[in-house]
Amino acid sequence: MTQEPQDRIFGGPMSDVIAFMPGSLNDLPVGLWEIIDRGQKSFGLQGEALANFVRRCIYSLIDAGAKPVAGGNKPNQWELQTQYGKSKQEIAEAVIAEWLRQGGQKPEPWTGVWFGLPWSYLPKKNG
């Protein structure tokens, strides 16, 4: 029997960390750098284990309605990134492949791809 990895900083099983990953989406998109940092620091993950954690987190975010976004040229403005694909599998694999091509290290904070809900990337309605 394999016991699920426990978060060594905050406590709790990995599945809970992944399930709660979308919790902040109403306030701010979730950055890939945050996901990687969490996997490394909370669970000591590297290599394929870290990639699998990233994949599961991306699935959780997409299941909650998030899509890939990147910071626009204006503060607090996000741009939808369609080049990663449409299905959660396509998106996760494309994001992971891009991350690995860039060396597989944690991106600098506040950079790279993020996952946001429609409020973050749809044009604001005048009203």
Image (spheres, rainbow, N blue to C red):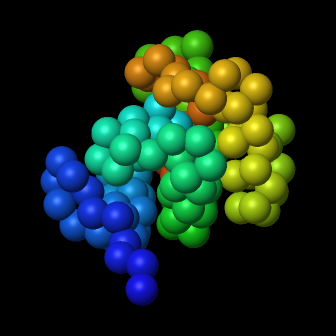
Which residue is the extreme one toward the top? 73
Vertical arrangement, residue 112 with respect to residue 89, above or below: above
Percent position of residue 78, x then y: 56, 31
- Pick the front one: 15 or 20: 15
Q: Can you tell which quarter of the image residue 19 is in?
A: bottom left
Above or below 87: residue 82: above
Q: Position of residue 29 (x, y in %)?
A: 45, 42
Nearer-the-camera pick, 15 or 83: 15
- Quadrant into which the N terminus falls: bottom left
* Above or below, comparing residue 112 to residue 50 in the picture: above
Where's residue 74, x and y in %?
Answer: 52, 15
Which residue corresponds to the image point at 75% horizontal and 61% vertical from the top-left? 89
User: Residue shown at 16%/53% (left/top)?
Assistant: 10
* 44 horizontally vs 98: left or right: left
Write the residue at 30% across / 47% down.
Answer: 42
Viewer can see residue 66: no
Residue visible at 70% across and 32% down in the picture: 100
